[in-house]
Image (tube, rainbow, N blue to C red):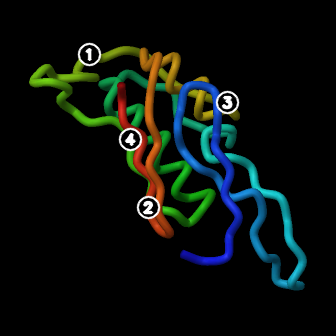
């Protein structure tokens, strides 16, 4: 693991977020926790699971991490198959998860990948 300092990201998730990252000038710059980042999802009719994928893609674009969200099946039951009008305009990812119907989640990250898992 790199020398990045990590902190627990609270508010119903057990993910860890770097406190700071080295900048190009060798100074430490604060970093926004992954689920506090503002995401954009184009408004449209799609499956909820598709909207979650678009949120993860925006997080990946912002951070350079490979982000993934939300299993398609939980305990044998499909999740996110319903179609609905959905979108987000500079909204925190945590809020997007709640609007998608996820009340509880768990986030696992390593050096290159973060996955948001439903609970």
- In space, the residues marked 2 and 4 are separated at their CA atoms by 11 Å
Q: Is residue 11 above or below residue 32?
A: above
- In space, the residues marked 2 and 1 are separated at their CA atoms by 27 Å
Q: Does the residue at mark 3 contact the one at mark 4 (Cβ under 8 Å)? A: no
Closer to the N terminus: mark 2 or mark 1?
Answer: 1
Q: Is residue 101 left or right of residue 2?
A: left
From the image, tell me which residue sits under label 2: 113
Q: Does the residue at mark 2 contact the one at mark 1 (Cβ under 8 Å)? A: no
From the image, tell me which residue sits under label 4: 69
Q: Secondary structure at mark 1?
A: loop
| Res 48 → quadrant | top left
Q: Is residue 29 left or right of residue 57?
A: right
Closer to the N terminus: mark 3 or mark 4?
Answer: 4
Closer to the N terminus: mark 2 or mark 3?
Answer: 3
Label at residue 82 = 1
Closer to the N terminus: mark 1 or mark 4?
Answer: 4
Label at residue 91 = 3
Label at residue 62 = none
Residue 77 is situated, as x and y percent measured from the top left of the image, at: 13, 20
């Amino acid at each position: 693991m790199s020398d990045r300092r990590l902190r627990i990201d609270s508010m119903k998730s057990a993910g860890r977020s770097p406190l700071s990252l080295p900048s190009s000038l060798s100074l430490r710059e604060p970093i926004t926790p992954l689920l506090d980042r503002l995401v954009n999802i184009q408004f449209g009719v799609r499956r909820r699971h598709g909207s979650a994928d678009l949120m993860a893609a925006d997080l990946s674009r912002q951070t350079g991490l490979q982000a993934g969200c939300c299993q398609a099946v939980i305990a044998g039951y499909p999740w996110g198959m319903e179609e609905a009008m959905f979108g987000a305009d500079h909204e925190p990812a945590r809020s997007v998860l709640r609007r998608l119907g996820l009340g509880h989640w768990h986030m696992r990250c390593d050096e290159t990948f973060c996955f948001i898992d439903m609970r």
